[in-house]
Amino acid sequence: MEPSELLARARKRAANPSDPLDTLAAANELSQEMTRDADALIDLAVRDARAAGTSWTAIGDRLGVSKQAARKRFTRNFTHPFSARKTRRAAACSFCRKPPNPHLHMVYGEGGRICAECVALAAEIVADKAKTR
Ligand SMILES: [Zn+2]
């Protein structure tokens, strides 16, 4: 759509179409709606690509961003129960919410998990309590 057509649409929405500031406010609102629609369009196309088995690397390539950037931008919108982010969150430390990683030991219990850093912190707290008694 041509910018002049969009301006005409903004004028129609303006509280007072003969006031350039009212038209500007309406144009700003219209622009924000278009941005939201454009973002939703890309989200949908990425979702389709992922559903078709396309890798984050290939998606990132087409969008001109890194695999990590593509994944980070779009995974938050997915509600698929097995999405990478949800899986990582489900495996995170129950105390500090740090996701598991090869350098952070995690102790698994019946109702949750605790990472080595939280174990160390808890040990310090318990030791301090014992001292003040
Ligand atoms: Zn922790």
Image (cartoon, helix red, strand yellow):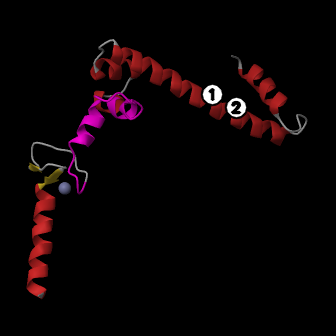
Camera-side residue of 31 and 43: 43
Amino acid found under the numbered disc labelled 1:
Met
Position of residue 122 measured from the top left corner of the image (x, y, whole percent): 14, 67
Q: CA distance from mark 2 to mark 1?
A: 6 Å
- Could you say which quadrant of the image residue 50 lies in? top left
Disc 2 residue crowd, few under 14, some 14–19, many 20+, Cα 10 Å: some
Q: Which residue is mark 2?
A: 30
Position of residue 37 measured from the top left corner of the image (x, y, whole percent): 58, 26
Q: Eyeballing the image, is 8 above or below 15?
A: above
**Labelled pair 2, 1 in contact (Cβ < 8 Å):** yes
Taking 30 as reference, is 40 left or right?
left
Q: Residue at x 30, y 17 (%)?
A: 58
Q: Where does the C terminus fall, quadrant-wise?
A: bottom left
- Give the secondary structure at mark 2: helix
Q: How many marks?
A: 2
Residue furthest toward the bottom?
Answer: 133
Position of residue 125 measured from the top left corner of the image (x, y, whole percent): 15, 73
Residue furthest toward the front?
Answer: 110
- Could you say which quadrant of the image residue 130 lies in? bottom left
Q: Eyeballing the image, is 48 above or below 69?
A: above
Q: Where does the N terminus fall, quadrant-wise?
A: top right
Taking 117 as reference, is 73 left or right?
right
Where does the magenta region start and end? Answer: 71-96
Camera-side residue of 11 and 87: 87
Mark on residue 34? 1
Amino acid found under the numbered disc labelled 2:
Leu
- Give the secondary structure at mark 1: helix
Q: Residue at x 89, y 38 (%)?
A: 16
Position of residue 17 measured from the top left corner of the image (x, y, whole percent): 88, 34
